[in-house]
Amino acid sequence: MDAVTMDAVTIVGMAMVALATLFSLVGFVCAILIIVKMFQHNQTGLGIATLIGILVCGFGYLLALIFGWQNKQSWQLGKVMPAYTGSLILSFVLFGAGWVLMAPWVAREMQRIEQQNPGSDFDLDSQYGDDLDNGLAPPSFSEDS
């Protein structure tokens, strides 16, 4: 079995994704605190919609952000809202940058796995050929008949 080798850029990308995960956890805790404030201030429908939005599609984070800032003073969220906003922004930026830095390594690993298991479900060479080696692999939009 070949040893998995990573360059410094990939390690930095992984560290960024790990840090983004921590910021996401902070954002989740802040969102829960905002939802609790919604229920405490008789905004039950809004609280339920935000909670369901977080659990189903992530839209609840935006609801919590908007209504949290609108009611920051009356709901006493003076310290929570800046932390929530900062954690959301940092998690998005770090996740994006981390995955961009890790993409070449992921592509190489997928190629390595495909070469070790010919005929596997994700046959990259037949789909992209040499373009994958050059980093030019476009998404495949052809329809199979």
Image (cartoon, rainbow, N blue to C red):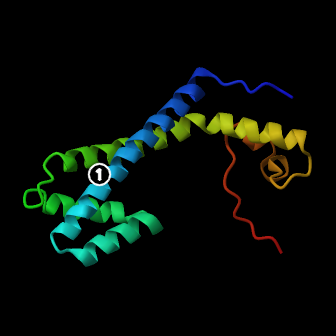
10 Å crowding of disc 1: few (<14), some (14-19), many (20+): many
Amino acid type, mark 1: Cys
Say which residue appears at 62% left-offset and 39% top-offset. Answer: 103
Looking at the picture, how far across and down is residue 40, in whole percent? 18, 67
Say which residue appears at 67% left-offset and 51% top-offset. Answer: 138
Looking at the picture, how far across and down is residue 98, in whole percent? 51, 37
Of the 4 image quadrants, the one containing the C terminus is bottom right
Between 35 and 11, the one nearer to me in the picture: 35
**Left or right, residue 22 beside residue 31:** right
> For residue 38, what is the image quadrant?
bottom left
**Left or right, residue 97 beside residue 47:** right
Looking at the picture, how far across and down is residue 143, in whole percent? 76, 70
Q: Examine the rendering and report whether any part of residue 133 can be seen.
A: no
Between 7 and 59, the one nearer to me in the picture: 59
**Left or right, residue 118 beside residue 141:** right
Q: Which residue is mark 1?
A: 30
What SS does tag 1 mark?
helix
Q: Residue furthest top?
A: 8
Above or below residue 141? Residue 123 is: above
Between 74 and 11, the one nearer to me in the picture: 74
Of the 4 image quadrants, the one containing the N terminus is top right
Q: Residue furthest front?
A: 40
**Left or right, residue 106 beside residue 49:** right
Say which residue appears at 36% left-offset and 52% top-offset. Answer: 28
Above or below residue 99? Residue 7 is: above
Say which residue appears at 7% left-offset and 57% top-offset. Answer: 73
Q: Examine the rendering and report whether any part of residue 52 can be seen.
A: yes
Above or below residue 18? Residue 43 is: below
Q: Residue furthest right?
A: 118
